Image (cartoon, rainbow, N blue to C red):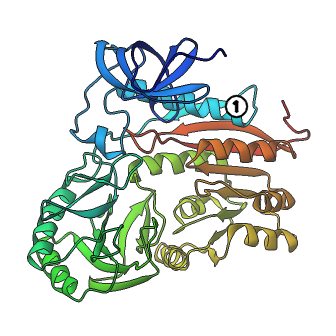
Amino acid sequence: MEKTSLKKNDETVLEITDMNALGSGVGKYEGMAVFVPFTAVGDVIRCRIVKVCKNYAYGIIAGIEKASPRREDRGCGVYSKCGGCCFRHISYEEEARIKEKAVRDAFSRVGGFSEIPFDEFIPCPEHDRYRNKAQLPVAEENGHLICGFYSKRSHRVAKCTDCLLAPEIYSRILCTLLEMLEKKGISAYDEITGKGILRHIFLRRGYHTGEIMLCFVTSAECAVLRDIARDIISSFGEIVSVLMNINPDRTNVILGKKTVLLAGREYMTDIMCGVKVRLSLHSFYQVNTAAAELLYRKAYEYAALTGEEEVLDLYCGAGTIGLSMAKGAKKLTGVEIIPDAVENARFNAAENGIEAEFLCADAGAAAAAYAAKGAHPHVIVTDPPRKGCDTDTLDAILKMSPERIVMVSCDVSTAARDIRYLADRGYSLDKVSAADMYAGTAHVEAVALLSKSKKPSIT
């Protein structure tokens, strides 16, 4: 590519012709891709360039010359500031198209699959008020406590007590809490100085039960919060658990290692795919319950259980995926590294009359130990973190040689990479579906079915 004449702060008219997986529109200037957030395919904009790299550039909207018919105002006055949603300016149909394309592109470009056995796109059943969890940083503004969300690529708090993705009751709780906290003189933690008490407010709500867990994340123990915990539980009967999590470290990690019960009980409950679940503060639980139920039903369909199969559930969290499949399995074993989550999974199995074994161990180490013992589960289910599975885990899965592998992933690129690894070593990719768990945001999940193949599907 010839060197572009484009410079920072230049303004140019740009037509948006594509969208990338991160939610930015793509236009071309002298053959160079220019990425512009909050645009839509079909927009003609005045674009101000904010950064020029060797082969691409970034810009922002300076004005809209011609609006795309794909634009649609889906509400929210802070989405362009908070760094959460990137698709609240386009129709959901267009958002779904972009997300399905992102999954197909990942399996093509990262996974190297020339033919993708795409099954279906599972849309988000609710576009607003679907999040069951919120973690809101706290700051001070003009002498008052505020909470909200970090602006994109910063730790500057964009004030927001009523996120349209969260239950409406969160807004009432937060407004009441901030007033209580101010009256008691609770200070916001300052990341720069390391001074102040309150770092985050954590909320989680049971989609089916309505139970709410509240946690104050603090830099040190604070006895005053016990009084606030008692008062907030009296004001909102839905709150069944109030905790204080102490995180004294200068870190981006939200939760610390020590948690203290302030009021109520140490857990909350919900129902997932008909299974009652107990959740502690550290338990992994899908943020969108209704969408997760659709995703898990697809995973259950892919597992094709007849009642005779042994199922190994790696990265099982509180056991939600495995327990949703237990009715069709002969034996269920789950592996999770977080002790609280394993305790929840064991309780959840007992509470629902399900016989299952849950081990507290690293997924890769446990899989390797199982393989070394000659275990051969019929179906292995994985739901790894965003970084995907490491090669030790994948090699152990291969050694156990299950008939089917069902892989759920919150990062389609690492899923495509891991599935490529398995496909090159004797498994075929039979089906893959995209699942939208987070309407309005750039995130999309995938669930894939692999089965033993006589010859690798190398392309």
Residue that sits furthest to the right in the current view:
454
- Residue at image coords 31%, 46%: 82
Locate residue 440: give its quadrant.
top left
Compared to 104, does 16 lie above or below?
A: above
187 on left or right of 304: left
Image x and y of residue 133, in percent: 35, 59
Q: In this view of the protein, which residue sits in the foreground, 249 or 215? A: 249
Return the residue nearer the eye: 371 or 245.
245
Q: Residue at x 67, y 53 (%)?
A: 305
The residue wearing badge 1 is 109
Quadrant of the image for the C terminus?
A: top right
- Based on the displayed image, in which of its 4 quarters is residue 282 positioned? bottom left
Mark 1, secondary structure of its residue: helix
Near mark 1 (Cα within 10 A), the count class, few <14, some 14-19 or many ≥20, is few
Left or right for 218, reference 227: right
Residue 214 visible within the image: no
- Residue under the image location 27 percent in, 76 percent down: 196
Closest to the observer, 100 or 31: 31
In the picture, the quarter occupied by the N terminus is top right
Position above or below: 184 against 164: below
Q: Residue at x 18, y 57 (%)?
A: 171
**x and y, in percent, of residue 226 in the image:** 21, 86
Name the one closer to the observer, 289 or 197. 197
State the image quarter where residue 235 is shown. Answer: bottom left
Q: How many marks?
A: 1
Inspect the image, locate mark 1, and give the three-letter code of the amino acid beneath it.
Arg
Establish if 212 lies above or below 419: below
How far across and down, in percent of the image, does residue 4 sit?
A: 57, 17
Is any part of residue 311 visible from this angle? yes
Residue 294 position within the rendered picture, expressed as x and y whole percent measured from the top left: 47, 46
Q: Is residue 35 above or below residue 258?
A: above
